[in-house]
Image (tube, grey):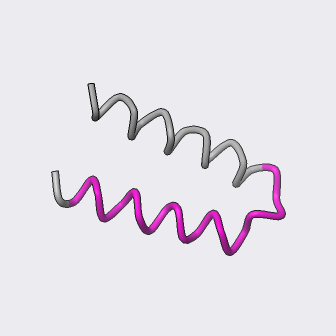
């Protein structure tokens, strides 16, 4: 679980750095979906 949380944080930070690209937007949506799936 801790590794998944760490990956989520790193991915979120990466999205902030590359938020101007459309690919990061799709990645951000995937991260949000993954987080909501884990909450279930």
Question: Within the image, what quadrant is residue 8 found in?
Answer: bottom left
- In the rendered image, residue 13 lying in the magenta stretch gets the answer yes
Principal secondary structure, stretch drawn in magenta: helix
Rendered residue at 17%/59% (across/down): 2
| Residue 12 relative to residue 9: left or right | right
Q: Residue 30, position in %: x, y?
A: 54, 39
Q: Residue 19, position in %: x, y?
A: 75, 63
Rendered residue at 22%/60% (across/down): 3
Q: In the rendered view, would you say 15 is above or below 1?
A: below
Residue at the left extreme of this rendering: 1
- Quadrant in which the C terminus appears: top left
Q: In the rendered view, would you say 9 is above or below 38?
A: below
Q: Nearer the viewer, residue 4 or 39?
A: 39
Rendered residue at 49%/61% (across/down): 11
Rendered residue at 65%/69% (across/down): 16
| Residue 28 relative to residue 31: left or right | right
Q: Residue 35, position in %: x, y?
A: 39, 40
- In the rendered image, residue 21 lying in the magenta stretch gets the answer yes
Q: Write the start and end of the magenta stretch as one range.
A: 3-22
């Amino acid at each position: 679980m801790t590794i998944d949380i760490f990956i989520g944080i790193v991915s979120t930070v990466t999205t902030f750095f590359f938020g101007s690209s459309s690919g990061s937007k799709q990645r951000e949506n995937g991260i949000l979906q993954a987080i909501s799936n884990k909450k279930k």
